[in-house]
């Protein structure tokens, strides 16, 4: 298995810390509003990663946090996003957090994103954060200002590495404006105090206050995965600040590099801008559903791009993804009625190709190409094991093909048989017979459409 490590900016051979096991921490959602499909592109990516490791025989342990405190509107300045949601909807931050956390997992389930083995809420781990901050402070990486306890980024030599930051060019920004006692522009808060208006506050050795967003992920990842674990995932926006700060905190507390591979997913964009709250161009899963799209069509769209390449979202591309998904299901409808070949060894090269595509830094577009090559080949050489093989591939793709097929009305046996005979007639170039068979199919209430991805059967209204 090869994986691109942001730390080295190289594709590296993945070696697990413990043979056969992979420990993954995935930065989870800030639950103050509905997650948008940009966020979900990131979670489809981490889900594909987990599924790939499982497919390759690893035992995976995946942990994801739920940010329900401490993520402020502009990094560490401004209102807590949860409190913003609470003010917007006239509820408590806790009500907001629970509501949107539930909505997040409902949408994630629609996309067949597997639930992490452990999901952990920031508000339920304040004592773990305090304990980690104490270690950071005891090791000499922190200092006090009026804002709270601050991390001294100059004490950690490797601070700039993950984000390839040019620290000497960094201007004193918003953080220094609100806190003139900061030693360096990149220094960040570990624990924030003196914020009487903040609704969520806890006692701590540094006074009443609340943790910053970054310490939450350090504390919970170490708690559940240990002081050294394999992979940390998130979106590319996390590289220069959130993950850079996590990495610094981890080192300051433990004296070690905790994370071995930092892996980041690229953005879903709308034209030239990323989809995001501040860009005001959000689309949610429910909106797609109300426009007649299946969530699995969005997942299919995500599979068409490498996780490290930006993916531009358009209605056209989603429609085309939905058509491909339907094409695959039509194929499944036909192929699941085929007889099994006695010798299905012809499928082996496809299985090997699929495996090496996903093992090559999750090259899912390449893996999808293998699926369609197989469909083309199978149309000429019907064998039910083709569909079984595609269902096996779906353990990685996660489209839920078996389920989707079971909830859509099956094409009658006779129509399937006629379609198969027509395919054989077309292969023999017996066009007259192919037309006659098409006529029979139409009489039985089905239209047959020849697409580049094989014939598709559609019930006629
Ligand atoms: P948040 O809830 O803001 O903490 O974001 C949750 C996840 O979504 C993070 O991993 C972000 O990096 C990711 N994310 C945010 N916007 C996008 C986008 N437009 N495309 C892909 N991932 C995104
Ligand atoms: Zn995080």
Image (cartoon, rainbow, N blue to C red):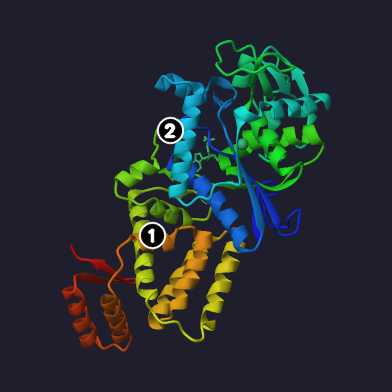
Identify the residue at horizontal 41%, vertical 54% (top origin).
296
Pinpoint residue 312: horizontal percent, then vertical percent. Answer: 43, 48
Tell me the residue at 16%/75% (across/down): 443
Frontmost residue, 289 versus 257: 289
Q: Residues within 10 Å of mark 1 (few under 14, many from 20)?
A: some
* Label 1 SS: helix
Mark 2 and mark 1 lie on one chain; the one further toward the N terminus is 2
Label annotation for residue 404 = 1
Looking at the image, is 120 positioned above or below residue 176?
below
Image spot of residue 85 (x, y percent) = 45, 24
Residue in the image at 64% along x and 11% along y: 194
Kindly check if marks 2 and 1 are in contact, taking CB atoms under 8 A apart as contact.
Answer: no
In front of the other: 209 or 143: 209
Residue 15 seen in the current view? yes
| Picture quarter with the C terminus | bottom left
Residue 273, image quadrant: top left
Relative horizontal placement of residue 161, taking residue 138 as reference (left or right): left
- Label 1 near ligand 1 (CB < 8 Å): no
| Tag count | 2
Which residue bears the numbered disc 2?
279
- Place residue 269 in its image quadrant: top left
Q: Is residue 111 left or right of residue 78?
A: left
Q: Quadrant of ligand 2?
A: top right
């Amino acid at each position: 298995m090869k994986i691109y490590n942001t730390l080295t900016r190289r594709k590296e051979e993945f070696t697990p810390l413990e043979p056969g096991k992979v420990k993954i921490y995935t930065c989870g959602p800030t639950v103050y509003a509905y997650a948008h499909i940009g966020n979900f592109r990131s979670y489809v990516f981490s889900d594909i990663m987990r599924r790939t490791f499982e497919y390759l025989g690893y035992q995976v342990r995946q942990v994801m946090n739920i940010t329900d405190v401490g993520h402020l509107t502009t990094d560490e300045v401004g209102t807590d996003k949860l409190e913003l949601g609470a003010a917007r909807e006239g509820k408590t931050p806790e009500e907001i957090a629970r509501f949107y956390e539930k909505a997040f997992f409902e949408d994630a389930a629609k996309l067949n994103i597997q639930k992490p083995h452990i999901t952990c809420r920031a508000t339920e781990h304040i004592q773990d954060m305090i304990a980690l901050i104490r270690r950071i402070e005891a090791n000499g990486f922190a200092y006090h200002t009026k804002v709270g306890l601050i991390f001294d980024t100059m004490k950690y030599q490797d601070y700039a590495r993950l984000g390839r930051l040019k620290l000497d060019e960094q201007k004193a920004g918003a953080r220094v404006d609100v806190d003139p006692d900061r030693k360096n522009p990149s220094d960040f808060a570990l624990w924030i105090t003196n914020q009487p208006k903040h609704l969520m506050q806890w006692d701590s050795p540094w006074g009443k206050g609340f943790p910053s967003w970054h310490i939450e992920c350090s504390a919970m990842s170490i708690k559940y995965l240990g002081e050294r674990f394999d992979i940390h995932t998130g979106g590319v926006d996390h590289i220069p600040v959130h993950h850079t700060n996590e990495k610094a905190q981890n080192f300051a507390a433990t004296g070690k590099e905790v994370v071995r591979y930092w892996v980041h997913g690229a953005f879903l964009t709308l034209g030239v801008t990323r989809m995001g709250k501040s860009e005001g161009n959000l689309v949610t899963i429910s909106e797609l559903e109300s426009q007649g799209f299946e969530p699995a069509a969005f997942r299919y769209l995500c599979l068409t791009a490498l996780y490290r390449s930006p993916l531009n979202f358009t209605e056209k591309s989603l429609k085309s993804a939905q058509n491909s998904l339907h094409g695959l299901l039509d194929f499944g409808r036909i192929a699941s009625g085929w007889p099994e070949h006695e010798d299905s060894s012809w499928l082996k090269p496809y299985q090997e190709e699929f495996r090496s595509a996903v093992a090559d830094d999750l090259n899912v577009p390449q893996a999808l190409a293998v699926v369609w090559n197989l469909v083309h080949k199978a149309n000429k050489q019907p064998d039910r094991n083709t569909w079984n093989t595609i269902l096996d591939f779906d353990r990685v793709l996660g489209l839920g093909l078996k389920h989707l097929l079971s909830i859509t009305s099956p094409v009658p046996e006779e129509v399937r048989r006629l379609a198969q005979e027509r395919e054989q007639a077309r292969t023999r170039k017996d066009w007259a017979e192919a037309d006659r068979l098409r006529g029979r199919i139409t009489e039985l209430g089905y239209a047959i459409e020849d697409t580049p991805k094989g014939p598709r059967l559609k019930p006629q209204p």
